[in-house]
Every structure is written in structure tokens, then in C-alpha cells.
Amino acid sequence: MLKSTKTAEKASGFLGKLLGWIPIDPNSITIMSMFIALLAYMAFDKSIIGKAMTLILFLFAFFFDAIDGAIARAKNKVTKEGAFIDGIADRVVEFFLVLTLLQFFPLDKTMQAVVVSILFFGTCMTAFVKAYAEHRGIMKHEDAAKLPGLLERAERSILLLLAFILLSFGQFQYGVYLLYLIAGLSAITFLQRFFTALYSK
């Protein structure tokens, strides 16, 4: 939702113009986001400093993941390969964030299942529906790209980061509630896209 708004398009264009001078290939920025997410996962521990460092690194990872496309468009370097790498990076960055969230619940099987369901339905299945609908020919690329989503990646990423903050800094129960909400909305988004693709003709 956020990504498809005119405000988001203007913000992306502004970032592209602002950062287009950076002498780094957009694909390199995308790859860097994955390495930063890995570092964020490795930096996590239960101390305040560890949690703060993890949060800062994840913010950088998502920021790099957000600006790579803007810089590619500003430099006129938009390619199919870049879009492919960007899609993979989206999943990897979110995977490491979800993996980090799992460390809050080492003995709680219920919450582990909730977090894993976010990974499966949120990160994997909502994107898979788009790709598979196009692959099987029931939707054209343009239509598959426009499949609606109650909780798309931008919103899900923001909520996951908010859940991390709540779990880390004294609002643990609210963080748990938010994870339940994200899991439910992710499943609904999957079903929404599944039925929209199935009955698109």
C-alpha cells in the first residue's frame, strides 16, 4: 500500500536525486543490505547495547534496501537482474529480522510458531503468489505486480521493527500482541492475493 502511493513515488524520486551521486552500483547497495542484516542478527544479545546495535543495523539494512531502486532509476540503471536481486534481498533482510525475533522466545513454542508463520506467510507466500500466478500464466506481469495486499512488505517491515522495539525496551506484552497481529494480517494478505489471482479472469 505505502509503496504504491504517489507520496512514496515522490519520496523515492527525491531519494534518487539526493543520493544518485554515490559512486556505487545499485546492485552493490542491495547486496550490502543483506550483509548488514546478517550483522544485525549476529550483533543481537539481551543487553540494551546489543538490542540497540541490532536495531540500528536493521534500520540501515532496510534503508539500503529502500534506496537501491531509487538510485537505480536516478542513474538509469534499472535492469531485470537488479529487480531479481532486490526481490531476493527483500526476503533475506526480513528473514534475519524474523530470526532475531525468534531469540526472544527460546522456550515458548507458541510464540515461535507465530514468528515462523510471519516468515512463511508474510515473507514467502505473499510474494510467491505473485510470482507463481505470472509463472503459470493466469496473470500478466503487470497485473501480478498490482495484486492487492492488506499488509504488504513495507508495512510489514515497519510493524516488525516496531515489534522488535517493543520487545526490547520494556513493552514486551505489546510486542507479543503486535506479532500476533502481523501473523494474522500476513495470512489474510496471502488469502487475499490467492483468491484475487485465482478469479482474475
Image (cartoon, grey):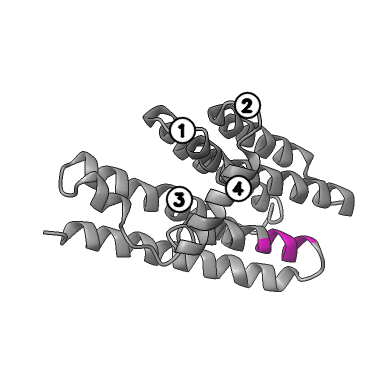
**Number of the label disc, if any, that sits on residue 24:** 2
Disc 2/disc 3 C-alpha distance (Å): 33 Å
Q: Amino acid at mark 3?
A: Phe
Nearest the viewer among 12 and 124 is 12
Q: Is residue 26 left or right of residue 187?
A: right
Q: Which residue is mark 1?
A: 76
- Is 127 inside the magenta-drawn segment? no
Quarter of the figure with residue 42: top right
Residue neighbourhood size for the residue with mark 2, other residues' Cα within 10 Å, grouped as few (<14), some (14–19), many (≥20): few
Residue drawn at (60%, 47%) of the image? 15
Q: Are marks 4 and 3 in contact (CB under 8 Å)?
A: no
Q: Which residue is mark 4?
A: 15
Position of residue 81 measured from the top left corner of the image (x, y, whole percent):
41, 27
Q: Which residues are magenta?
A: 162-168
Q: Amino acid at mark 4?
A: Leu
Q: Which residue is mark 3?
A: 120
